[in-house]
Amino acid sequence: MLLPLFGVAFVGLAAATCYEPSYALPPPEYDQDHPILKDAWTNLHDVLTIALGDPKYNSTSISVEVTSSKQSLWEFHHTARARNASRPDIPQVDGSALYRIASITKAFTVLGLLQQHAAGNLSLDDSVEKYLTELKGPQNGTLPWKDITLRSLASQLSGIPRELAQSDMINAGNMDQITGEWGLPPVSREGLMTCDEYSDNYHSPCTASDLIRSVKADHPTFAPNQQSTYSNVAFELLGLVIANVTNKAYESYIDEAIFKPLEMGRSTFSNPPDSEGVIPLWPHYWDVDEGNPTGGIFTSSNDMSKFLRHVLTRYNGITHALNWMHPVSPSKDLHSFYGMPWEIFQSDRVLTSSQRAVRFITKGGGLPSYTSQIVLIPQYDLGVTLLLAGPSDFFETLREIVTIELARAAEQIAIATLEESYAGRYIAADPRLNSSLILRVDHRGLVVEEFISNSTNMLQSSLLRSLGRPDDKPWYLLLVPTLLYRDEENQKGEIWRLQIASERPKGETDVWDDFCVNDVEGPWYAGIPINQAVIWKGRSGLVYDIDLEGFRASLVRIFAHGHAASHVEETEQMEL
């Protein structure tokens, strides 16, 4: 009975069509002198300089900075030619120049929340009313507080309306404009809020009491966790939660728990001196008191790179409760998702040599004359900060130029590194075994070109059906990194998995051909996954040995001169 059950167990997997996996390459190590990187920086500098020479961008200042998880790699700054003479700002824009980053502040609020979850001071899955007891009891609205968790607040899944008062058009113009140009009927202001959560010279700022009173009179846009919809109010509530569980003002906590440990010495919630900031022509919103948990931070590109490095190295280790980079819910279309609090975009149109999807984990922020976005690309171990002061017209061009050029360069470096370090012929260390492996690298990743195990040609073996080999379309076998190690403490012995991928057909296909159920595990053989491989590298970064654990075979790399790679490793150790 075992054989039929074995076959049935993999029917669903074999029937699925899975094309190029998004994470087929390990993140590259970045050498500042790598020719691909140097070409990318030169090209970006030239393209941005030429584009910003257009007179329509005379009042635009920008800062761009690119970092890996280890170090800043490149930065570009441009100072507007038309300056605000009434408010002299920083003479020359550089990496220390301060911008308003508006809603990017939400990423700091969520990091604070995750830290408090990890410390055991709160749970993401508790209802918000547990920490804000003022929400309990009678209310004039219908928001179901017992169903609104901290996780749903941070994920834009609370269903709470976007603003308190700022989005009310009665505050945006005079009554003649409202009833005339806008065609709305005259109404009374009686009973409306008199504060503004983003106060300026004409409004008084809203207090915590105003916030609580307002939300208790609100009605949901959606039921909690039904559908994503953007809410600044949700993050104001999260700011109050952080303050309550830490017994500190929200701003003090972020400063002590994030700014200072990360040495973000330029970052602040307080309005900085004009001479340290980038102040565009009016309207500049440099002085507007924004709601701090949702959008109050002033910071620089240098400081944001420190924050991005922290996220890139810890996003799956801040708390066991979640991987911080994962999507939480879909947005409006096929390619866009919400995270906590990320706005995530995935596209298969980025790379020129492959249809592999690239995922951008972003958070944007906007105020009149300030536009900003941070972009994390974990599969390439990259973070990008884009800061703009002035008209927002140039921002979409800026983002397109920088992120696409960067992703393509990173892909080239990853493939070149894979080719140098992994590609080649491997033979069994035990000469009694007729086992060998030939690995080559192309746009698909680390492809198995030949695989002999105990004299059996595995690429023709029916065993590969259990790994998802289709019977009705071209396919290939490749090794995919798990980013785990046999020796985690010393980061030695990379664990990879053999996987089947289908060749993407040209022309029109069935709609359901795009459906893919990812199952990396594969069947086991005597307690070990047959598709598990452990790759060992020498000090130079070259692979010298591959353990195909399921096949109980240790294969040694053979170099062109005929020496086994283990000899190279021994030589490296002797030289060191």
Image (cartoon, grey):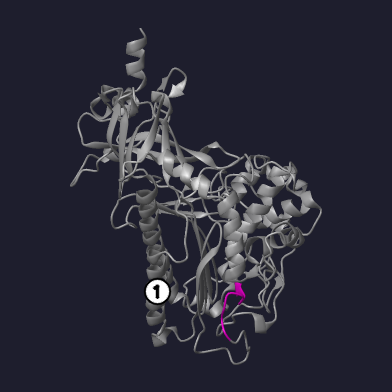
Choose top left, top right, bottom left or bottom right for residue 56.
bottom left
The residue that disc 1 covers is: 42
Farthest residue toward the bottom? Answer: 85
Q: Residues within 10 Å of mark 1 (few under 14, many from 20)?
A: few
Residue 117 x/y as whole percent: 69, 44
Q: Which of the image's four quarters has the N terminus?
A: top left
Q: Nearer the viewer, residue 235 or 77?
A: 77
Which residue is at a point 40% across and 32% down the rendered structure image?
519
- In the image, what residue type sits under mark 1? Thr
Q: Is residue 226 visible?
A: yes
Q: Nearer the viewer, residue 188 or 193?
A: 193
Residue 480 x/y as whole percent: 39, 40
The reply to whether the magenta stretch includes residue 545 is: no
Q: Is residue 535 above or below residue 370?
A: above
Choose top left, top right, bottom left or bottom right for residue 458.
top left
Q: Is residue 328 visible?
A: no
Q: Is residue 130 above or below residue 187?
A: above
- For the magenta stretch, what is the residue range? 92-100
User: Could you tell me what secondary structure mostly forms the magenta stretch?
Assistant: loop
Q: Is residue 462 left or right of residue 403?
A: left
Q: Is residue 196 above or below residue 456?
A: below
Q: Nearer the viewer, residue 4 or 183?
A: 4
Q: Is residue 466 left or right of residue 510?
A: right
